[in-house]
Amino acid sequence: MSGAHVRSDSPLDPSQLRFLTRGVTAEEVAAVTAVLTAAAAAQAAAAKEARADSGPDAWSRSQRALRAELRPGPGAWRSFSG
């Protein structure tokens, strides 16, 4: 196969493939093209799902570490665990 990457939203063109085996039939080219197209579509769908299920973004995650405001007064330092 050539070094070019195929976009997952476009069908795979058999001319983009390079077979090292000689005498490959048209049916074999079609079968390989179908398998690679299906694999690329499955990988793109899995990547899209992983992005959707990734949870909160980095900005939201960084905000979780903020603690509540410290208030002065009697007993204010009692709960401090520094």
Image (cartoon, rainbow, N blue to C red):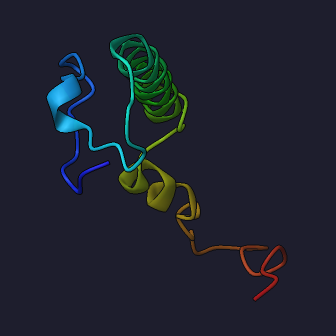
Residue 17 appears in which quarter of the rendering?
top left
Q: Where 70 sits versus 11, above or below?
A: below
Picture quarter containing residue 14? top left
Give whichever of 73, 18 is nearer the camera: 18
Q: Position of residue 4 (x, y in %)?
A: 18, 50
* Residue situated in front as seen by the camera: 73 or 9: 9
Check the image and report above or below for 25 versus 27.
Answer: below
Q: Left or right? Give the position of 80 relative to 72.
A: right
- Residue 19, how many percent across, how many down? 34, 43
Expressed as whole percent of the image width and height from the top left, the position of residue 40 reads 41, 28
Of all residues shown, which one is farthest toward the bottom?
Answer: 82
The quarter of the picture where the C terminus appears is: bottom right
Compared across the picture, whether 67 is left or right of 28 comes to right
- What residue sits 36% from the left and 54% below the top? 59
**Height in image: 5 above or below 16?**
below
Name the residue rendered at 22%, 16% in the picture: 11
How far from the left and from the top, in percent, is residue 25? 38, 19
Q: Residue at 41% x, 56% y: name it.
A: 58
Horizontal side, residue 50 vs residue 58: left or right? right
Left or right of residue 26: residue 28: right
Residue under the point 36% across and 21% down: 29
